[in-house]
Image (cartoon, grey):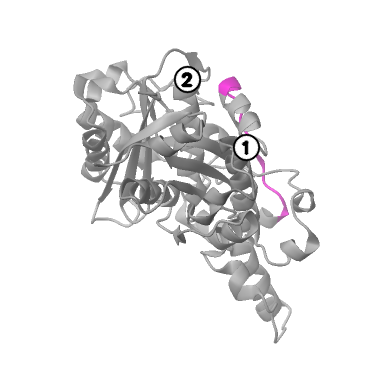
Amino acid sequence: MTRSVAITGLGAISSLGESVGEFWSSLKAGRSGISPAGCNCDDSALKVGAFVSGFEPVRYFSSDELALMDRFSQFAVVAAREALSDAGFDKGSSSLLSMGVVVGTGCGGKHTDEETYRRLYRDGGSRVHPLTIPRGMPSAAASMVSMMLGISGPVFSVTSACASAAHAVIQGKMMIECGMADVVLVGGTDAPFTYGLTKSWEALRVVSNDTCRPFSQDRSGMVLGEGAAMIVLESVDHARERGADVYADLIGVGMSSDAGHITKPDVDGMSRAMKLALEDAQMGPDMIGYVNAHGTATQVNDVAETAALHKVFGEYVRSIAVSSTKSMHGHALGASSALELVATVLSVKHGCIPPTANFSSAGDGCDLDYVPNEARYRTVAAAMSNAFAFGGMNAALVVRSHNPG
């Protein structure tokens, strides 16, 4: 018998704050974390970003610990600590011995890479930091979460661009369902604000130079962000046995591949992932009250996602609230779908749908209820969160209000 999966802990660090509480307060208020770019972007067209401003690693880590950690790993550990504490797991808990960790990242340790190349190519050095490889490897964040929190079950990383965290969540759900683990800490992290990476995003010509306006007529592109979010997944039986508080149940997941263009989204690929998630959840389209959209604010994505929603939900789509929280926390790449799942879970828990901030008027091909600029308070029994990545890798997650029975 397949085991049901509950969400019992949340952690987040983003441009909206260094905790879930700050994150959720900003989302409810429609308050954007997008600000002018710093010195890394002086000669770049990338003029704005969603930065974790004021982040002081020494508040969270010793100097010895920091010597081992790229910025993306620091974010992951901060969010993981909050999520485990929120779920009621102490560092010495016996549950940590068999707990799993799956962390998604789209970039890995870019700050470490940047420093290495600066030493070699700009400064003419012949040696680099001896910990360059373990700091910068994409799996470093998962390893540091395991080491610093004492988690010794299955630990690994997932990298699938902007769907990385959603794929990590799906892996965790599968591990619990098949009995490999009772508890899995899942999520995503990225810290992309390095000179080389911002210049690379500039070259794609999809970034905005002012702000993020998903689904709006005057949208001008995506805004890069950084941060991490971690989620504690737990079998419902295990959560019940230890008396854990449950935010929501993770009841459906779907994955697909476009098998097409490496950057252009495909309506059929998007819709397949959503349909598979509904089938896994054993839900009809009319049972979803809210969709947290991928919603990047690029010209192509927003129209394609709107068309895919029409294809999946039919006429009922006009009764569904759809919003993009990227309008506030930016596109944090491999961390985005984890941040968005946290937002989706809290919308179900608290009956509050976060808005699409900066919304002006609906763009051509964008004809849904995008919850413009102000949060909407109403009961949300079930919700979907979408993630559609470069390379045509798609994922959809369905959560439902917890049923203690």
- Where residue 217 appears, as percent x and y from the top left, is 42, 28
SS of the residue at dot 1? Answer: loop
Is residue 357 toward the left or the right of residue 306 in the image?
A: right
Q: Is residue 327 left or right of residue 361?
A: right
* Residue with the most extreme top position: 378
Q: Give the CA distance from mark 2 to mark 1.
A: 17 Å
Tag 2: amino acid? Pro
Is residue 181 rendered to the left or right of residue 118? left
The residue lying toward the viewer, choosing from 138 and 350, is: 350
- Numbered mark located on residue 372 in the image: 2
Which residue is rendered at x = 27% and y = 21% of the image? Answer: 287
Percent coordinates x, y for residue 391 in the rendering: 34, 56
Q: Which of the two discs, 2 and 1, labels the residue nearer the N terminus?
A: 1
Asked if the stretch drawn in magenta spans residue 36, the answer is yes
Identify the disc placed on residue 51: none
Whether residue 386 is in magenta: the answer is no
User: Residue 193: x, y in percent?
Assistant: 62, 54
In the image, what residue occupies the spot 35% across and 53% down? Answer: 263
**Where are the magenta residues, as a range?**
28-39
Per the rendering, the mark at residue 34 is 1
Which image quadrant is residue 123 in?
bottom right
